[in-house]
Image (cartoon, coloured by chain):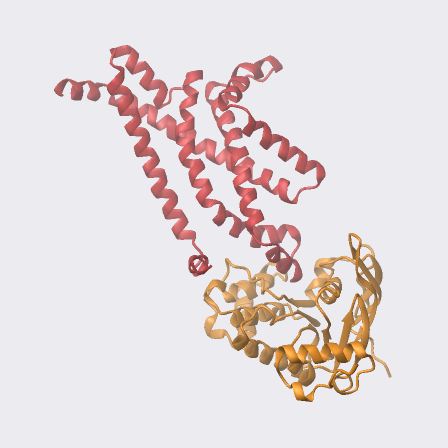
Chain colours: A orange, B red
């Protein structure tokens, strides 16, 4: 029996000027699935993520979130976005608010919770990412890794049905990447549906259910991590994975060598 | 020296009166300027095509013409189209509209200095654009605009002197009257200059205190690090 996918994308197109960034992407993501999207920069991975919560409006194609077509006219984007958490490469924490304030502002101003409820929920979300003790610190007083964890807590506060991660560790110093990946891994274990654009191959292999390799605005290949890492169908996938693991150093010996 | 002290004692009540009016003009003009400037800045950044055009036209008109011309048009010109304002009314309106144009530009600069990521993050948690402006953009932009706004406040203390040309009894007008009455201009104008300096010093201290009070912890460190 097949359940209703949580996200369904059909023939997605997006152009910026003359540059066609997305050339017909179709994709389904099931509940509790962790999908990692990889590919060279400029291939439309981030654009695709942003289309899912309508931060970018697609030129063509349709997107469903659960049973609702979000690309249909007259949908309430603010309501739709409450069901989709997003984590950005450069955190985008609200600089004038404390860590706790960053989590609670959406609860009070968007969901209409009262202060006390919001405070409790906010502290609980900070606890989840291991930062309850930093609740009163401002973003400028936090490390990059801590900022990103607060950003994750902020997104989780809205009780999203799916989380989008747009290169969540790319702006971090190497020694801070681990703490963010650990939080993401924990989320995945808890059953969160996640779409993750990342170059962290270790995370992709260990945590994801499926890897999607995108290039030039199309999905070149997708499948379970083992298949993509050890038996990719396309030479481009093989080359890219080889290059990226070489670049990021980890588990190089385990990746399939590029041939030809 | 004694003569000077006796003379000053005699004119001090007039100076106090004038100083009160100058302060009143400054505060009202700044408040009116903020009330006009903030919406103008928002219209310029977030408004549709027409709102944007109206905001730009207003800003360029009042930044592009001398304050004195604006004052005269409002006081002497508007009656021709059936709008007659009192001296004070004309003074408030001219100073307020003029300040509003400059304040709009300070606010606009501050709003645009807040990275687009802030708006994106706010929209991503489901905030409407209006809420995002109100709760995320403005609190940061107003803090950023404070130093420039302080400059405007200080300048306004002195700009108000222009109302002497339509005989609003501010500090400058009083000085002119006293100087004429006693045929003793130099001590009078020096005293007035000193009063303006004191007013500006007070305004500076107030604005610095406000800036310090509203500082976001850690942010000053971050600017140093870069």
Residue A124, position as x, y percentages in the image: 55, 74
**In which quarter of the view is residue B225 placed?**
bottom left
Residue shown at 29% from the left, 15% from the top: B178
Residue shown at 60% from the left, 12% from the top: B80
Position of residue B129 in the picture relative to residue A143 (left or right): right
**In which quarter of the view is residue A205 placed?**
bottom right
Position of residue B211 in the picture relative to residue A224 (left or right): left
Residue A175, position as x, y percentages in the image: 52, 77
Please name whichever residue, B28 or A42, is drawn nearer the observer in this view of the structure.
Answer: A42
Relative to B60, does residue B175 appear above or below in the rendering?
A: above
Residue B61, position as x, y percentages in the image: 59, 27
Position of residue A147 in the picture relative to residue B190 (left or right): right
Residue found at the far left of this picture:
B2
Position of residue A99 in the picture relative to residue A205 (left or right): left
User: Which quadrant: the C terminus of chain A?
Assistant: bottom right
Residue shown at 58% from the left, 50% from the top: B134
Residue B45, position as x, y percentages in the image: 63, 43
């Amino acid at each position: 029996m097949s359940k209703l996918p949580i996200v369904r994308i059909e023939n997605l197109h997006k152009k910026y000027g003359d540059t066609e960034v997305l050339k017909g992407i179709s994709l389904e993501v099931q509940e509790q699935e962790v999908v990692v999207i990889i590919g060279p920069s400029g291939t439309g991975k981030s654009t695709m993520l942003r289309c899912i919560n309508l931060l970018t409006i697609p030129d063509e194609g349709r997107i469903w979130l659960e049973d609702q077509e979000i690309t249909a006219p007259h949908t309430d984007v603010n309501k739709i976005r409450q069901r989709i958490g997003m984590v950005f490469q450069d955190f985008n924490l609200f600089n004038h608010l404390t860590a706790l304030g960053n989590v609670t502002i959406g609860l009070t101003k968007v969901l209409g919770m009262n202060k006390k409820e919001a405070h409790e929920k906010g502290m609980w979300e900070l606890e989840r990412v291991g930062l309850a003790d930093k609740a009163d610190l401002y973003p400028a007083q936090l490390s990059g890794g801590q900022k990103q964890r607060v950003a994750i807590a902020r997104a989780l506060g809205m009780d999203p049905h799916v989380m989008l991660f747009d290169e969540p560790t790319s702006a971090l110093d190497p020694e801070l990447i681990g703490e963010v990946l650990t939080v993401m891994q924990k989320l995945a274990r808890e059953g969160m549906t996640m779409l993750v654009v990342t170059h962290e191959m270790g995370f992709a292999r260990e945590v994801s259910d499926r890897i999607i390799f995108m290039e030039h605005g199309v999905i070149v290949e997708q499948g379970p991590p083992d298949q993509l890492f050890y038996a990719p169908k396309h030479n481009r996938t093989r080359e890219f994975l080889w290059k990226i693991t070489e670049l990021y150093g980890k588990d190089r010996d385990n990746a399939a060598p590029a041939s030809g | 020296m004694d003569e000077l002290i006796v003379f000053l004692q005699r004119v001090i009540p007039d100076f106090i009166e004038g100083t009160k009016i100058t302060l009143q003009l400054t505060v009202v003009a700044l408040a009116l300027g903020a009330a006009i400037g903030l919406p103008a800045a928002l219209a310029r950044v977030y408004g549709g095509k027409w709102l944007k055009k109206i905001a730009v036209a207003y800003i360029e008109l009042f930044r592009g013409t001398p304050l004195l011309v604006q004052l005269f048009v409002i006081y002497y010109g508007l009656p021709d189209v059936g709008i007659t304002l009192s001296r004070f009314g004309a003074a408030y309106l001219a100073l307020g509209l003029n300040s509003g144009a400059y304040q709009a530009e300070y606010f606009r600069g501050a709003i645009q200095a807040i990275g687009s990521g802030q708006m994106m993050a706010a929209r991503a948690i489901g905030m409407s654009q209006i809420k995002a402006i109100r709760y995320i953009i403005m609190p940061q932009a107003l803090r950023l605009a404070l130093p420039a706004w302080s400059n405007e406040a200080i300048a306004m203390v002195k700009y108000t002197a222009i109302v002497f040309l339509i005989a609003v009894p501010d500090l400058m007008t009083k000085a002119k009257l006293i100087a004429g009455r006693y045929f003793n201009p130099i001590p009078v104008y020096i005293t007035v200059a000193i009063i303006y300096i004191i007013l500006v010093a007070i305004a500076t201290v107030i604005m610095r205190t406000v800036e310090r009070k509203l500082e976001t912890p850690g942010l000053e460190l971050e600017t140093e690090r870069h």
